Amino acid sequence: MTNIPKEFKLEKIINHTEYLIDGKISSWIGKQAKVYSTLLCDSEDKEPFLIGNTPEMSAEYALKALDSAHKAYNYGQGSWPTMKVYERINCMENFVKKMILERDKIIKLLMWEIGKNLNDSIKEFDRTVEYINDTIEEYKIIDRKGATFQNKSGVRALIRRGPLGVVLCLGPYNYPLNETFALLIPAIIMGNTTIFKPAKHGVLLIAPLLNAFKESFPPGVVNIVFGRGREIATPIMETGKVDVLALIGHSSSAISLQDLHPQKSRLRLVLGLEAKNPGIILKDADIDLTVEECISGTLSFNGQRCTALKILYVHEDIKEKFLNKFSKAVDKLKLGLPWENTLLTPLPEPTKPKYISDLINDAVSKGAKIINKKGGIKQKNFVFPAVLYPVSKDMNIFEEEQFGPVIPIISFKDISKPIKYMSESNYGQQVSIFGKDVDTLGPIIDSMVNLVCRVNLNSACQRGPDIYPFTGRKDSAVSTLSVHDALRSFSIRTFVASKDNELNKNILREMIDSKKSHFIRTDYYL
Ligand code: G3H
């Protein structure tokens, strides 16, 4: 491995054998899955590079993890779901302190395992720590709000949010730390117990955190198993003992997992799924700003973001100008290794370059042109982004979520054309609209807010900041995530009510003074 800065070199193959079940870290002695990195295979003669091994655990162990989570929850009677809020917060604070110690290792593995550039890998780690800290603060606010009695129509009530039960957490490969933890952390802190299986890529980077989880939470609260989704998640779902399926990934996996649950009406879903966010460029758009936003929108992390702009609609009047500037800007982008901090980096999925090339070939065979000079140039681990124009309905790229470096463009005269696309689309996450005239923008925005869940004005689509709601309509999401909303999604309101009479008042007063209940209390944690 030449030319790799010393601090980013992987000295040896990481032979990870451990898993966490019931508060114990044990060593897996069965089958191991090989972890490859595609970073260095830039030509056909180079093969993906072996960087480690992880356990390929069996259904038997998946069920052990489930039993452990089930035992820790114990129908809501376990010590974790009934624990005082501040004690759960203390556990989480401990965890985040220990997690920070593993920062460098995790950032390095983000680069090796999924090819994310250095700045974005750093951002992913730091954003996750900030997310945890913000979650702790938000939970204190929610707890504080739940510390007052209400009295209506002669019924006194103390209403709080309680946990839901056992949560199966499955995250995506493009944000293997951040998005997985954006599910796991709120689920845990609200008093649920969890089973977590890392994504298909970005697995080794979870290993350094096993100990932090073990030392910070009581046995069974967090169970971490490794292996294939089919082997691990299928038997767990079939038992019907999962109360929440928390998944960020593809709707096909979410649907098949839900279908396995024998009592679907008790299964709560927290899902972040596919999207095909359009960028719509009106005739008075500021071209330079639009090009800049469309570059980051379509191509940050090579377009492997659910929030990426995946199709561009450009007004006929500025089509030439936009296509010209945009395709030149794409051709100027550099492909490099993650530590070189280029926007374009190798694709972690070995089959992705072929998939992207197939999309390009299909569009070209049906009349689209590759309008940038370098578009479609292929190497074993990458395809240079192709700007495709004009794209039409019969091309696969029109509907498919490419999740990679290829940019389909369509022109329009009347705004009804992109609006129709959005109305008929299976997805409804976000849109970006570029323009200046308020008379034109106003009604368009009013239509779009009912088709998606975030309209970005002269800005690329994105999830953050994490205090804003992240969700989608149609097949793009179920439930809302944000620091605040995730705490709601992983909990339910539950309360104690009493007729307002002297007997009940005295009991409640005594209960509060004696601190005999963790639920009935009016104090809160600062
Ligand atoms: O893959 C989808 C992510 O939630 C996108 O998040 O907009 O912060 O890149 P981001």
Image: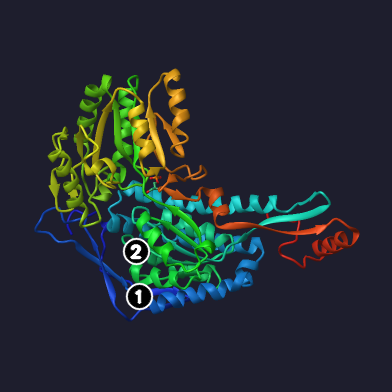
- Residue 295 vs 378, above or below: the answer is above
Tell me which amino acid carries mark 1: Met
Check the image and report above or below for 382 versus 451: below
Image point 46% across, 59% down: which residue?
A: 246
Q: Nearer the viewer, residue 53 or 429?
A: 429
Label 1 packing within 10 angstroms: few (<14), some (14-19), many (20+): many
Check contact, mark 2 vs mark 1: CB within 8 A. Answer: no
Q: Residue furthest bottom?
A: 29
Q: Which corner quadrant of the image does residue 496 belong to?
A: bottom right
Task: Indicate yes or no: mark 2 CB to ligand 1 under 8 Å.
Answer: no
Residue 336 rendering spot, x and y as whole percentages: 21, 46
- Is 83 situated left or right of 237 in this image? right
**Within 10 angstroms of label 2, few (less than 14), some, or many (20 or more) residues?**
many
Q: Which residue is mark 1?
A: 57
Q: Nearer the viewer, residue 253 or 284?
A: 253
Say what secondary structure mark 2 lies in.
Answer: loop
Residue 248 makes an appearance in the image: yes
Nearer to us of marks 2 and 1 is 1
Distance in Å between CA atoms under marks 2 and 1: 13 Å
Would you say residue 23 is visible in this rendering?
no
Q: Residue furthest right?
A: 502
Q: Percent x, y for residue 517?
A: 74, 66
Element under label 1? loop
Q: Which residue is mark 2?
A: 203
Marked residue nearer the N-terminal end (2 or 1): 1
Relative side of 475 to 148, left or right: left
